[in-house]
Image (cartoon, rainbow, N blue to C red):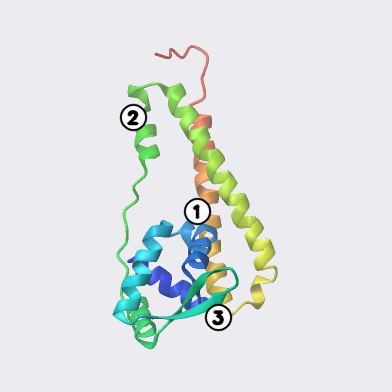
Amino acid sequence: MALEHALLVSLSERAGSGYELARRFDKSIGYFWSATHQQIYRVLKRMEEAGWVTVESVAQQGKPDKKVYAVAPAGADELARWIAEPVESTPTRDELGVKVRGAAHGDIDAVRAEVARHRAEHARRLEEYQLSEKKFFPVPDQLSGTALHQYLVLRAGIRAETGYVEWCDEVLQALRPRKGDHRP
């Protein structure tokens, strides 16, 4: 997926400035597709040149004009084309998993500490997702359209984070020091 498609999805939900898009990435889409603010601005310029987005200058008091981007018809066509395109299954790449697999050849306590650090980060993200679920989707069985689609992606994130936290707990339990263990 190109960043262009993630931006088209976001702009299809709501027009916005480059700054607003960057904030949306920080708070939602960025959990699934990351981009720096500089990348977003560069890609918006390319999308404007390609005719995928329109730009409206909005005057601001005491500040430079704000550029507000919206999806142009050509952008809507590109988004529809991309959505219909098959998605390749991406193999999992997890450096922590490789470290756990090789733990017998190194410092198991260091691996445990790294697993605990990852567990804490995933637990924090899980809590954030669950708070978003309660705040934005209090009655999920009444959702439809864009709200339903956003909810379904959030649920995928909740399930993934739950699974990762559970796996970290399993690893920490399995690698706990036992009586008679000899650690390097």
Q: Is residue 155 above or below residue 116?
A: below
The amino acid on which the numbered mark 2 sits, given as a three-letter code, is: Gly
Q: Which residue carries the number 2 mark?
A: 102
Q: Earlier in the sequence, mark 2 or mark 1?
A: 2
Q: Which residue carries the number 1 mark?
A: 160
Q: Is residue 24 above or below residue 106?
A: below
The tally of labels here is 3
Q: State the image coordinates of residue 116 (x, y, percent, origin top left).
A: 52, 33
Q: Which residue carries the number 3 mark?
A: 145
> Could you say whether the residue bearing mark 2 is in a helix, strand or loop?
loop
The amino acid on which the numbered mark 1 sits, given as a three-letter code, is: Ala
Disc 3 versus disc 1: nearer the observer: 3
User: Dot 1: few (<14), some (14–19), or many (≥20) neighbours within 10 Å?
Assistant: some
Q: State the image coordinates of residue 138 (x, y, percent, origin top left).
A: 70, 68
Disc 2 versus disc 3: nearer the observer: 3
Q: Which residue is at 69% across, 71% downward?
A: 139
